[in-house]
Structures are given as structure tokens and as C-alpha cells.
Image: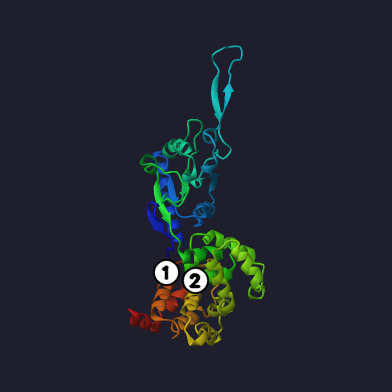
Amino acid sequence: MSTTNQEGCLGARLGGAEMQRVLNQLFEANLALEEKTGKRPTPICIWGTHGMGKTQIAMDIAKSKKWKIAYCAPAQFEEMGDLHGLPFKIDPDPTKIGDERTAYMPPDWVPTDEGPGILLLDDMNRADDRILRGTMQLLQNFEMFSWSLPPKWQIIATANPDSGDYSVTPMDDAMLTRMLHLTLNFDVKSWAEWAIKNGIDGRGVDFILTYPEVITFRRTTPRSLVQFFGQIHTIPDLAASIDLVSIIASSCLDDETVTSFITFIQSALTKIPNPSIILNAEKPDDFIAIVNELATGDGGFKRIDLVNTLCTRITIELKNSDFTPHKNLATNLTSFLLMDIIPGDLRFALHRDLSGIGSSNLPSSKGVLEACKNPKVGEAIVKMI
């Protein structure tokens, strides 16, 4: 799900999970090509609005692969010496005049060990035009006149849209064609999966899953939300500390987001059960009443948005490689899928997501696959189609 205008960006628009999949493919292809032919890789530029997590994706991939990473922020450079290093004199024979020459000391951010590794040029198009032009040789040949990247290193640049909304330096075609380009879109399910894996407050994750439209990409961005959730995670009862929560929220989020969050913790937060209540139940009767209550809002209106949030949290939990399946997992999932309170389109979407898990090697796959293949579930899905 994209909630932002990406005018001024280049390449395919990808959510976080898909972006990682594509980057992994490009990295592996680059390494194989370098090993086979000695040709250096093609750099990659990730475009997107502020606070999307462009830098974090590059960092996460390096960490997951146990690759080295070197960080560079060209916008901080004042002169070319920051890029190619400072000069010093070499005098092989002090008694001889004319054999002196100038060499350069590479900056300390330049890697010296063989990769695999990623050199991250963060917010590249916020650099001065002269600095940008100075990186062209680096992008083309993985070297400056004064230093070279070691073998098996790859370059990722990040950039903000060149749409008039950001203080950026335009990159001409000669520079753009030296890189592959991808644009990071916000996908709420991918973000939620990342957030849970990284220990982000689950109450905040539930809020964003329920109200993804609050991400305005002005003050409210995925980055500012993570900052906010980090500040409130030590508050056990958000509703009891509503004034404090409101003050902290106002310090980093749009007013509309603050209002929505306060409403959420007052009216809906306590209703959303932990996925384990469904997945680890001894019998379906232990959770059916809880889910029905979740779906019943004030005045008898159905809260399908909260049911959708629960479905997403269930899917994320089952994707966790550390998940330990309960002996009744298949039975519980089957009963949940067949609940009347779940609309047909939501049941269809959940079944689709679960089928992907069932065909994987995850610990939950056996029980999930059994539930997906249940004849009654199949009948319910066919009715939707």
C-alpha cells in the first residue's frame, strides 16, 4: 500500500519486502558477474520520500548477510578533499631534487578489506553539484584517482525525489545511467513485519495496521512513528497516561495522527487480542467470543478494520522463524477462517497469505497448510470467487 506521491523518483515502485527481494537478486547477480568476469557491479539508487526507511533497508540487508558496511554522507562534504582524501608528499630520495610526488590519504570511511560489503552513499542528491560530479568516476569504476574499493564491494545510494519539494541537486543523465534505480513505497504489512521483528511497541504496530492512512509523509512518517513508539514503550497503560502520551505524540507527529492515536488507545487498543490467543488456544471456543467482541463496535457497527489488523498480526506471527506451532494450530486456524464475522474478501486475502506460508519451510507451514486445504475452508473461498 502506497500512501505518498512519488513524483520525481525513478524505477519500479516497491514495498519493503519486495525491495529486499529485488536487492538480494541484484547483489547476488553482481557478485557472480564480478567473480566470472572481473567486472565491477552496477551501483543501485533507492529513491523515496523522507522517513521511508531507505537507509535502514540497506543496513538490514548487510546485517542479514553478515556483510561489511561503510557509510558515507556526501551532503556533509565541503570540498573534493573530503571525497578523494588529503594530499601528502612522497620524497623517495631527500638528497635528490625533482623526484618528489604527491599522494593522497583516503578518507577513513573508505573500506580497505575485501568484501562482500556495501558502501552506502546516503542522501546522495543532497550533496553540492561539485561533489556529485566528483562521484561519477566512483559510480563508474568503483574508484577515485586516489583510492579504489576492494573486491566484492557494492554501492547503494539513497535519494529524495527531485520534485521541487526537497532541497536536492539534480542528477543529469550521465550520472543517472551509471546506476540502477528503484523507488521505495510504503507497504503497511511489510513495515509491520519489520517493526515486530525489531521490537517496536506492538500497540503502535496495531495502530498503524488499523489506520495506515495517518502516515502523511509530512511530520508523520515511518521514521517519526518509530521514534514516537520508542518513547512510549515504557508506559504500561497508555490510556491512564493520556496527557503525557499526547504531549510526546505532538512532539513528532502531525496533529491529525495525534488525534487518531488518542482515539485508538481510548476505544480500540484493549480490544485487539494477541495472535497467540487464537494460534495457541486449546479449543476454538476459547477465542471465538473474543474475536466476535473485537468485531462489534459501539452502536452495533462492525469493526472490520480491527479484524483486519488481527488477521495481519496472525500472518506476521506465523511468518516468524522462531514461532513454535501449537498442537491445535490447524484446528484453530480453520475455525478462525470459517468465522461468520470475517467478510469474504478478508477471508480470501488471509487464505492467500496463509497459502504462501504453507508452501514455505517455516515451522508453522505444516499446520497452516492443513488449515488451508480444509474442504470447508475451500468451499468458503470458492463462494467468494
Could you tell me how far apart the alpha carbons at marks 1 and 2 are, in whole angstroms? 25 Å
Q: Say if mark 1 contacts mark 2, CB within 8 Å.
A: no
* Residue 329 vertical position relative to residue 246 in the rendered view, above or below: below
Q: Judge whether residue 348 can be spotted in this image.
A: yes
- Residue 299's x, y, as percent? 50, 87
Quarter holding the N terminus is: bottom left
The number of discs equals 2
Q: Which residue is mark 2?
A: 211
Q: Which residue is mark 1?
A: 356
Asked whether, in this view, residue 164 is left or right of residue 206, the answer is: left
* Residue 351 vertical position relative to residue 35 in the rendered view, above or below: below
* Front residue of this view, candidates 142 and 219: 219
Q: Secondary structure at mark 1?
A: helix
- Residue 265's x, y, as percent? 58, 75
- Residue 236's x, y, as percent? 66, 72
* Front residue of this view, candidates 104 and 31: 104
- Specify the amino acid type for callout 1: Gly
> Residue sitting at 45 percent across and 37 percent down?
138
* Front residue of this view, candidates 370 and 111: 111
- Residue 7's x, y, as percent? 39, 55
Q: Secondary structure at mark 2?
A: loop
> Residue sitting at 65 percent across and 74 percent down?
237
